[in-house]
Amino acid sequence: MINNLIVIPLVINGKELSFILDSGVTRTILFNISQNDSIGLNDVEKFSLQGLGEGKPVGALLSRKNNIKIKNIASNNETIYVLLNDYFDLSSKMGITIHGIIGYNILRNFVVKINYKSKKIDFYNPKSYAYKKCRKCEVFPLEFYQKKPYINTKVQIDTISNVLTDVKLLIDSGGSDAIWLFENSKKEIKTPIRFFNDILGEGLSGHIYGNRSRIPKIKLGDFEIENPTVSFLDTISTKNARRFKERNGSIGGGILKRFIVWFDYPSKKITFKKNGSFTKGFNYNMTGLDVIYNGKQLVEEQVLKPYSNNNEYNLNNSINYISSFSYKFKSSFKIKSILKNSPAEKAGLLKDDIILKINGTPAHHLNLNKIIFKFQEKDNKKIKIIVNRNGEELKFEFRLEKKI
């Protein structure tokens, strides 16, 4: 689990790779292969793909008759789309190497139980799987459009009235946000008064822009999820997604992680059972910083080795330490971009600054998940950052600022 996304080991043609399990994609897409990860691809031809974003279709390769395996689950006739460039740049955003995304091609064959809390996935044979009685579960029929799963649910957008709006949402385990809503896909779906504009992510066709805000609630059957963060997307970024005229947005990992979820494509249904994260609040990055993984850097570390001084003058038999230094390659992080008028920008931080410390903790002792958590903790929390800018160490200080 990284930033609400599920990463699974997937073996393709004998090579183990890391893939995001994404219910919002119909194709298995490979986009990050180096010489060290090279795999043999079968029956290849040129292709083009179009996705979310405001750009044009991108070049790709289509490869058929590939072997794919997860533990004992295997197929020897899988089609893979290979992007010629890593448009997603997910590895730098997640801090580990991500080679691709897989969704429909594996979910279609099983009842897939995802326990976000225990970080465990079970794959069941749909012909023999028997659901246990569950009075605390909510079951929804799935509607498929171009092999993507949708449910009908309700959201409350207006903070004054209690009116609920019916919406059709894509179940998108490959989206880290809680909810996306398409601006004006219904007359009620409009950005609330309090919001800020942001780059919400990147699709195959470029940046995805929208307004971040909150709504009073989303209702999944009897489950009422209060004050979720919501991103309202403009028409340009979602032009291709809006080809399904009835679609109003997506439910992402920020909601899904609060449940045990059973994806049952063969029976066209999905089941939710809330877990211990259900009542936790919804936070977002309050710094304005977009921080990414920046590879490895050589770090000097102090090593303390204990030794016991048992001579006649050491009456307390105390333990002393010998200090030495070692050099190791550790993770490095840099600022990819900064929101205009954000606390970080006002403090003076710049794009491409290398982060050395956050609130006294060396950056190489952190990962992206921990950094994101520090940026989301609570309104008015003080953040102290030390960065390397062109070889010079600089200190900055600001407070997290709640905008929505």
Image (cartoon, helix red, strand yellow):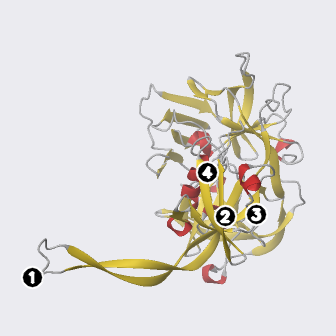
- Tag 4 near tag 2, CB within 8 Å: no
Report the amino acid beneath label 3. Leu
Report if the CB atoms under discs 1 and 2 are less than 8 Å apart: no
Q: Which mark is residue 375?
A: 4
Can residue 359 be seen at all in this image of the molecule?
A: yes
> Considering the numbered disc 4 on the image, is that residue within a helix, a strand or a loop?
helix
- Which residue is label 1 attached to? 312
Name the kind of residue labelled 1 in the image: Glu
Left or right: residue 238 versus residue 200 is right
Point out the tag, 3 or 2, that comes first from the N-terminus. Answer: 2
Cα distance in 3D space between marks 3 and 2? 14 Å
Label annotation for residue 292:
2
Q: Amino acid at mark 2?
A: Ile
Q: Is residue 347 left or right of residue 71?
A: right
Q: At x 64% / y 34%, what residue is drawn?
A: 228
Q: Earlier in the sequence, mark 4 or mark 1?
A: 1
